Image (cartoon, rainbow, N blue to C red):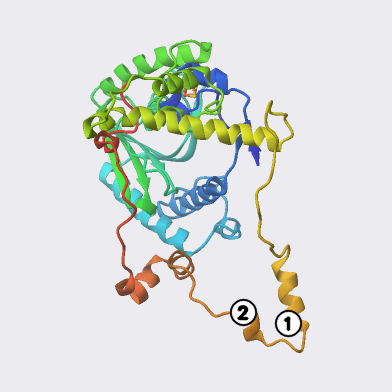
Amino acid sequence: MVDTLKHALLSPSSAYRWLVCPPSARLSEGIPDEESEYAAEGSVAHRLLSVELNKRLDLGIEGVESKVAVTKSRYYNAEMQDYIDKTVNLIEEIKNSIGECHILLDKRLDISRWVPESFGTADVVIASPSTICVIDFKYGQGIRVTAEKNPQTRLYALGAWYEFNDRILFDIDVKVQMIVIQPRLDLISEEYASLGGLMVWAGIAKEKAEQAFAGVGEFNPSAETCQFCAVKATCPSRSETAITIANGEMPELLTVADVASVLPKLEVAQKWIKDVLDWVLEQAVAGVEIPGYALTYGRSNRAFSDSEAVTDALRRAKDIKKADYTEERLLSLASLEKNLGKKRFTELLGEYVVKPQGRPKLTPVSAEVAEVEDV
Ligand code: SF4
């Protein structure tokens, strides 16, 4: 599904990129996002969270759909319900710790005072005279997201301040609490700031946002920044950086220390090469002529076009035994957990679950520190 209307040019969710590489915003403009299966699943989990929070916290917010509507989705299952219940418990605890407060769910927040023509939708906003709290719920489990130095939650917090500023008299020292909950990774991370501190950051972010809106500023390619950029395969700055790295001077015989010092650069070059190769193949498959190359297809294995029709045909054939075309097998651990729900799965099968060591991987020591550097 193509979605071009939902996001502002400078959306909070892509702020980690346009704050670091302002020209990326205009370069990516108009290139539609393809909605992935993961994003569609995440959107159902967010809808379920709103339904359950509205009920649990007795908010009576109009416009929140019925649970029946959400549970009809093909992405809804017992595992999702478990994670949402757990998240609702956490949010209820956070709300109780703040005391008397206003709560908004799935709220579109205006941040255009700092970021031109921009807005963002925060999952949960809690405001009281002593605390401004924004909670960002992430249902994904592929990428670990933390609240520390996270520009998305900082921008939501600014929007939350703006939303309530005419109803609540906030002191400059009021506590700003920014929380990311990622239940499938068992991750809750928080960042705290004073309103004054957040406003200082907002001033710096505003300058970068204005550059990004105008399509100016410095390119700043890196493995993290370019990862989800729409022009990652065709960006001249990224290719120039990667080619410069590849052409770099090296000693005759590399030591471990030499290799360690160029690893981050190799990662930039490696990812760029993969992105360019993927992109050019996509072009060729779409019918674009690639000078000097022809599109060919590798060996493939035969497969059934319609498994249900095959099963029906076999079932109807009187001379074929069921054992000749089916096998009884245990579902995967993930599928069983999904079908049984986390609680029942743990009760029944928890003692048999082991976690072998994963494939070895070198991770930069600084990677756990923060998603995005200060601007
Ligand atoms: S690919 Fe990287 S360097 Fe190029 S515009 Fe995108 S984020 Fe910036």
Neighbor class of circle 2 (other Cα within 10 Å; few <14, some 14-19, many 20+) is few
- Above or below, comparing residue 127 to residue 350 in the picture: above
Tell me the number on the disc at residue 315: 1
- Residue lying at 50% horizontally and 23% vertically, measured from the top left: 10
Q: Which amino acid does the dot numbered 1 rest on?
A: Arg
Q: Write down the quadrant of residue 9 in the picture.
A: top right
39 with respect to 139 (left or right):
right
Relative image position of residue 360 (x, y in whole percent): 31, 50
Residue named by callout 2: 326
Q: Write down the quadrant of residue 103 in the picture.
A: top left
- Count of number-bearing discs: 2
Label 2, secondary structure: give it: loop
Relative image position of residue 222 (x, y in whole percent): 40, 26
The front one of 60 and 372 is: 372
- Above or below, comparing residue 371 to residue 188 in the picture: above
Res. 84 visible in picture = yes
Res. 156 visible in picture = no
353 with respect to 318 (left or right):
left
Q: Which amino acid does the dot numbered 2 rest on?
A: Thr
CA gap, disc 2 and disc 1: 11 Å
Label 1, secondary structure: give it: helix
The front one of 137 and 276 is: 276
Query: In the rendered structure, which disc, 2 or 1, sits on the residue that comes first in sequence?
Result: 1
Relative image position of residue 298 (x, y in whole percent): 65, 49
Relative image position of residue 209 (x, y in whole percent): 45, 16
Q: Do the CB atoms of the residues marked 2 and 1 lie less than 8 Å apart?
A: no
Residue closest to the far front? 252
Tell me the number on the disc at residue 82: none
Quadrant of the drawing holding the C terminus: top left
- Residue lying at 52% horizontally and 18% vertically, measured from the top left: 236
